[in-house]
Amino acid sequence: MPHALILGGTGLIGRATVLRLLAAGWRVDVTGRNPANMPSEVTDAGGRFIQADRADADRLRVAVGDGVDLLVDCVCYTAADARLLLPLAEDARSTVLVSSKAVYVDAAGNHANSDVEPRFDGPIRESQAIMAPGDMDYRSREGYGANKVAAEHVALDSGLPISILRPSFVHGVGAAPAREWVFVKRVLDRRPTVLLARRGTGIMHPTAAANIAALIETVAHAPGARVLNVADPDAPNALDICRMIARHLEHEWEELLLDDTADPDLGRTPWDSAHPVILDTSAARRLGYRPAGDYAATVAAQIDWLVHAASTGDPAGVLPSASDPYFSRFFDYQAEDEFLARRG
């Protein structure tokens, strides 16, 4: 029975990966700081929790033991994290480091977290330019991608069989932020009209955690040092996503598609980019990767998870608060109603 160890495996990506590997006959251990964060479905499926802080080299060494067939790091954010990973990767047949599409820059040096939106000339390949490595706070807008690049460099320079995966806008059960809440909440609030900026044409390529798990299983059987994009097989725009969620929840509303003359604060969604951001996943497919499903198929469980949380009073605290700085900008119902009243 092959053995996998997932560092930081109690979160979104770890959960999907553990469940997929267990279903395929693997023995899977999961590290985390708090056993209370271990998803019950993972425990029920046979996943084993090992309490170990990501920065505790000694505890992680114990978790690896005599070696593993697959080592997955879901919480590698800095070069220091990557350096701590290397001794563990020496005792793994194949290692995966989860990075991000936030490392990519366009011809002007703009990236996903810059003040100016990037403009890429078509689907982004792994050969696309990336930002310079940095060591500022990885939780900052400028620091997140720069630290991921620094971590990637450490991994690739090691010569070890470490596959670096770059997903975009990850979704699934356990997502934080769960961007789909922008539409799910509107359905639950029985909003009769949905406003969409840029006529709903914005595209930010989503990646299901289940599809990341599918690629992780692929590279587990094909160890190597490489960088791979990972994303859903389709790249729906904001209008497509709005319709998919409404359809799944059997809700009908009027779609009001706003153009550039409208108030820029109206109809905002996480996907309303001025220029499409689409990942080219052909390198992963050549390796044998086959997605678990398209966006509509893989997002359904997350939608149901959000609805269940709302209907039960959210005891686990998975839903964003009304004052959440990320989500509050999307729910100005008063401004929307005033706009609709003026429109007549």
Image (cartoon, rainbow, N blue to C red):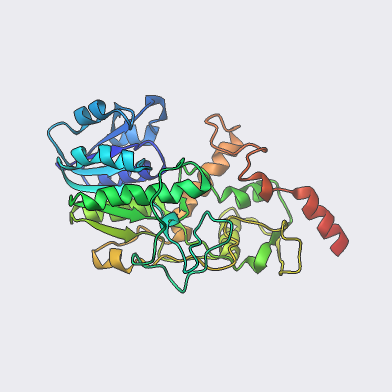
Residue drawn 80% across and 48% down? 334
Residue 58 rendering spot, x and y as whole percentages: 23, 26
Q: Which of 278 and 150 is in front in this view?
A: 150
Residue 233, quarter of the rendered image = bottom left
Residue found at the very far bottom of the displayed protein? 121
Would you say 19 lies left or right of 325 here?
Answer: left
Counting the numbered discs, the total is 0
In which quadrant will I find the N terminus?
A: top left
Would you say 319 lies left or right of 40 here?
Answer: right
Residue 200 appears in the rendering: yes
Residue drawn 47% across and 66% down? 106
Residue 328 rendering spot, x and y as whole percentages: 67, 44
Would you say 310 lies left or right of 66 here?
Answer: right
Residue found at the very far left of the displayed protein? 66
Residue 79, quarter of the rendered image = top left
Q: Nearer the viewer, residue 269 or 56?
A: 56
Residue 18 appears in the rendering: no
Residue 195 rendering spot, x and y as whole percentages: 71, 60
Q: Which of 55 and 304 is in front in this view?
A: 55
Q: Nearer the viewer, residue 133 or 7?
A: 133
In which quadrant will I find the C terminus?
A: bottom right
Residue drawn 41% across and 56% down? 103
Residue 52's place in the image compared with 124, above or below, is above
Residue drawn 25% across and 29% down? 57
Residue 256 rendering spot, x and y as whole percentages: 72, 65
